[in-house]
């Protein structure tokens, strides 16, 4: 099953994102369940994330989010997890 994780950064927290980017990328690679991922961009700056997880349950997706370095650093203003169906 796929889950879309949609995260919006707190205003004025670009430096938090930059300071934790390396740990975020390493976490995505080492967990092995990220199907696709990338930042949202507004006015040329990263301002959030879309991560598509390939995992067996909402609980597993939530556990992934709970341990994500950006979230642990307090970057996000909001996070939502929604089951997602790949069509194309």
Image (cartoon, rainbow, N blue to C red):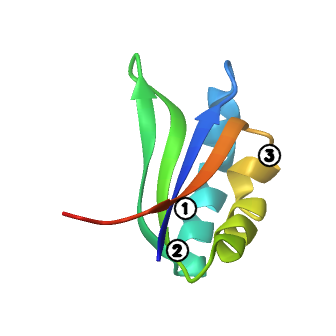
Secondary structure at badge 3 equals loop
| Residue 78, image quadrant | top right
Query: Label 3: few (<14), some or many (≥20) within 10 Å?
Result: few
Cα separation, mark 1 vs mark 2, equals 6 Å
- Residue 66 location (% of width, % of height): 78, 61
Vertical order, 48 against 64 (above or below): above
Name the side, left or right, on which 84 lies relative to 26. left
Name the side, left or right, on which 31 lies relative to 45. right
Residue under circle 3? 73
Q: Looking at this rendering, what residue extends furthest in the left direction?
A: 88
Q: Nearer the viewer, residue 70 or 85?
A: 85
| Residue 22, image quadrant | bottom right
- Residue 17 location (% of width, % of height): 63, 39
Residue drawn at (64%, 69%) of the image: 61
Name the side, left or right, on which 18 lies relative to 53. right
- Image disc number at residue 29: 2
Q: Nearer the viewer, residue 4 or 46?
A: 4
Residue drawn at (36%, 65%) of the image: 85
Residue drawn at (55%, 68%) of the image: 28
- Residue 30 location (% of width, % of height): 58, 79
* Marks 3 and 2, the one that precedes in the sequence: 2
- Residue 75 location (% of width, % of height): 72, 38
Vertical order, 7 against 14 (above or below): below
Tally of marks: 3
Secondary structure at badge 2 equals helix
Residue under circle 1? 25
* Marks 1 and 3, the one that precedes in the sequence: 1
């Amino acid at each position: 099953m796929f889950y879309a994780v949609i995260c919006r950064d707190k205003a004025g927290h670009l430096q938090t994102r930059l300071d934790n980017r390396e740990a975020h990328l390493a976490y995505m690679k080492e967990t092995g369940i990220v199907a696709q991922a990338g930042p949202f961009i507004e006015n040329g700056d990263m301002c959030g994330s879309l991560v598509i997880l390939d995992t067996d349950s909402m609980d597993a997706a939530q556990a992934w989010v709970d341990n994500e370095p950006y979230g642990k650093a307090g970057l996000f203003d909001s996070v939502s997890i929604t089951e997602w169906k790949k069509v194309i």
